[in-house]
Structures are given as structure tokens and as C-alpha cells.
Image (cartoon, rainbow, N blue to C red):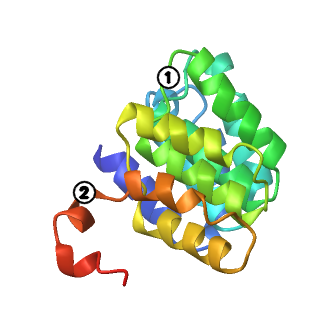
């Protein structure tokens, strides 16, 4: 894990993304190059620094290496697609994730919902919220604030507040001083 931490550290600067990818390719079929954690770090770093085109190649090459993406890898790719405005691809990957045997977790839903809201794709929002409720998940603070902003701006119907209330983080519900909306 020490080596993957060093690799992650090399991705702290945007200019290092290309260098990290070159190093990664030079390693060829080494043991480090066959670790899904290392791939996920590379994909995440490239996506966060606006080099999503770089992130796509390692992701699509996973099967050639005999690797399968894990939930974190899917979350990183879905978030990257959403940041680039490629909502259709994010949605396809979200659906493929479950078909591949990986259940979307709470983070997956929040990342995808943030993408829906930021890209103003509202068609699936209510269904996603209902699915989160059915699975016992809750919204994180960022996703909840995005919903409130969109409702306040008139982009989403106020009737969603009831469903959002069911998805409030438990820690907010346990502290009545944080929930005094009146």
C-alpha cells in the first residue's frame, strides 16, 4: 500500500498527471499495475484535474488486465462523467454497475444525484431518491444543499421536500436545533 500512497502523492499537482500515466505505462505488467486501487487512484486524479480523457483509457483497459472495477472505481468514473457534462455516459455506467454485480452505495447515489442536479437532468431524480429511501440511504450535506438550491430557484417542485425529509442524514435528525425550519 505504501507504493500506492506514493503514486497518489504524485497526483497532487495537475502537471503530474501525464507523468504519473507515463510511469504507470512504463511499469507494464508489474504487480502494482495489476491493482484496482492503483487504477482507481490514477482515474480519480486525472478526472479531478480536468484530464478525464486520460482517465477513460485505464478504465476501459481494466478487463484486458483481468481486473474488474470496484464500487469506488465506478463512483470515480460516474463523478468524472458528470463533471464533464457527459450525463448519458454517467447514467449508463450507473446502470451497468448493478448489472456487473456491484450495488451502488450511498456515495454512488449522492455522486449521481449531484451530477443530475448540476447538469439539470431531472427526469430520474425522484426515482433515485425513492431508491435511496428504499435502501435506507441518506443524502450527504452537499447533495442536500444542491436540492435546496434547485427547489429555491424553482427548478424542482417543492413537493420533493417530503421525500428529501426522509433522506436527511440521521445526525441532523438527532439534533432538533439543526432541524428548526420554521
Which residue sits at x=45%, y=47%?
Answer: 107
Relative height, residue 84 to residue 124 (above, below): below
Which residue sits at x=68%, y=18%?
Answer: 64
Q: Residues within 10 Å of mark 1 (few under 14, many from 20)?
A: some
Relative height, residue 169 to residue 127 (above, below): below
Relative height, residue 143 to residue 80 (above, below): below
Q: Is residue 26 at least partly visible in the picture? A: no
Which residue sits at x=70%, y=55%?
Answer: 116
Q: Furthest-bottom residue in view?
A: 182
Q: Nearer the viewer, residue 108 or 166?
A: 166
Q: Is residue 90 left or right of residue 136?
A: right
Residue 158: percent from the left, percent from the top? 62, 66
Q: Is residue 64 at least partly visible in the picture? A: yes
Which residue sits at x=58%, y=67%?
Answer: 147
Give the residue number, with chain letter if any, for mark 1.
102
Classify the position of the C terminus by image quarter: bottom left
Which quadrant of the view contains residue 169?
bottom left
Q: Nearer the viewer, residue 88 or 36?
A: 88
Classify the position of the N terminus by image quarter: top left
Question: Label for residue 170?
Answer: 2
Relative height, residue 100 to residue 174 (above, below): above
Amino acid at each position: 500500500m505504501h507504493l500506492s500512497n506514493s503514486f497518489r502523492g504524485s497526483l497532487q499537482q495537475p502537471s503530474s498527471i501525464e507523468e504519473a500515466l507515463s510511469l504507470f505505462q512504463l511499469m507494464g505488467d508489474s504487480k502494482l499495475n495489476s491493482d484496482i486501487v492503483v487504477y482507481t487512484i490514477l482515474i480519480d486524479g486525472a478526472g479531478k484535474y480536468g484530464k478525464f480523457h486520460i482517465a477513460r483509457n485505464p478504465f476501459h483497459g481494466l478487463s484486458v488486465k483481468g481486473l474488474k472495477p470496484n464500487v469506488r472505481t465506478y463512483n470515480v468514473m460516474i463523478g468524472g462523467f458528470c463533471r464533464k457534462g457527459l450525463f448519458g455516459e454517467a447514467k449508463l455506467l450507473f446502470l451497468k454497475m448493478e448489472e456487473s454485480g456491484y450495488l451502488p452505495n450511498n456515495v454512488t447515489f449522492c455522486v449521481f444525484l449531484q451530477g443530475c442536479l448540476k447538469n439539470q437532468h431531472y427526469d430520474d431524480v425522484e426515482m433515485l431518491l425513492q431508491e435511496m429511501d428504499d435502501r435506507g440511504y441518506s443524502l450527504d450535506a452537499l447533495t442536500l444543499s444542491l436540492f435546496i438550491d434547485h427547489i429555491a430557484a424553482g427548478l424542482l417542485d417543492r413537493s420533493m421536500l417530503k421525500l428529501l425529509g426522509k433522506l436527511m442524514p440521521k445526525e441532523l435528525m438527532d439534533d432538533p436545533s439543526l432541524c428548526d425550519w420554521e
